[in-house]
Each structure stands twice: as C-alpha cells, then as structure tokens.
C-alpha cells in the first residue's frame, strides 16, 4: 500500500524517485503509517503539505 501511495505522489508532483524531495516524502509516509494511519487518501493528504514546503524551498 505504501508503495502505491508513493508512486502516486511521484507522479502527481512530478518528482524523481532518486531525489531528496522524494526521499523526504517516503520518510513522511512511513512516519504517518507508523502512527497508525492506514487510509491511502489520508496518507497522501498528510504528505502533500510537506511536499509543497520542500518543493518551494522553505523548511
């Protein structure tokens, strides 16, 4: 399930798999999954703000 969500995020946000942003997104996905979140839509929703922040260059 995590790999499917990750693949969708890569495609939706036009990220390269080997980029620092993609690595951060995967870390965020795993973090949220470990918190007990299992809904793919919720996992994506919680990762998108992180991606926007990373893609805009702010931390």
Image (tube, helix red, strand yellow):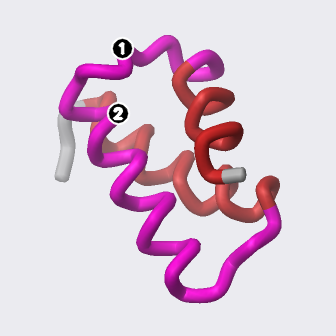
Q: Is residue 34 magenta?
A: yes
In x, y percent, where is residue 17?
A: 36, 21
- In this picture, which residue range is highlighted in magenta? 11-39
As drawn, 12 above or below 22: above
- Assess disc 2: are there few (<14), some (14-19) or many (≥20) residues with their C-alpha within 10 Å of its C-alpha: many
Task: Say which mark, if any, is on residue 36.
Answer: none
**Residue at the far bottom in the pictured view:** 35
Q: Mark 2 and mark 1: span between their CA atoms?
A: 7 Å
Q: Which residue is mark 1?
A: 16
In x, y percent, where is residue 9?
A: 59, 32
- Assess disc 1: are there few (<14), some (14-19) or many (≥20) residues with their C-alpha within 10 Å of its C-alpha: few
Q: Nearer the viewer, residue 47 or 27?
A: 27
Decide if residue 57 is on the left or right side of residue 41. left
Decide if residue 8 is on the left or right side of residue 13. right
Q: Secondary structure at mark 1?
A: loop
Sequence-earlier tag: 2 or 1:
1
Evaluate if marks 2 and 1 touch, with contact meaning CB atoms under 8 Å apart.
Answer: yes
As drawn, 2 above or below 52: below
Identified at 75% across, 72% down, the residue is 38
Q: Nearer the viewer, residue 33 or 52?
A: 33
Identified at 29% across, 30% down, the residue is 56
Decide if residue 38 is on the left or right side of residue 52. right
In x, y percent, where is residue 20?
A: 19, 32
Q: Is residue 8 magenta?
A: no
Task: Say which mark, if any, is on residue 22.
Answer: 2
In x, y percent, where is residue 42?
A: 75, 63
Identified at 50% across, 59% down, the residue is 29
Q: Residue 35 sits in which quadrant?
A: bottom right
Q: Secondary structure at mark 2?
A: helix
């Amino acid at each position: 399930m995590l790999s499917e969500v990750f693949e969708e995020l890569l495609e939706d946000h036009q990220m390269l798999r080997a980029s620092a942003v993609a690595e951060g997104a995967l870390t965020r996905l795993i973090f949220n999954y470990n918190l007990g979140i299992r809904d793919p839509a919720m996992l994506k929703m919680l990762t998108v703000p992180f991606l926007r922040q990373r893609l805009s260059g702010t931390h």
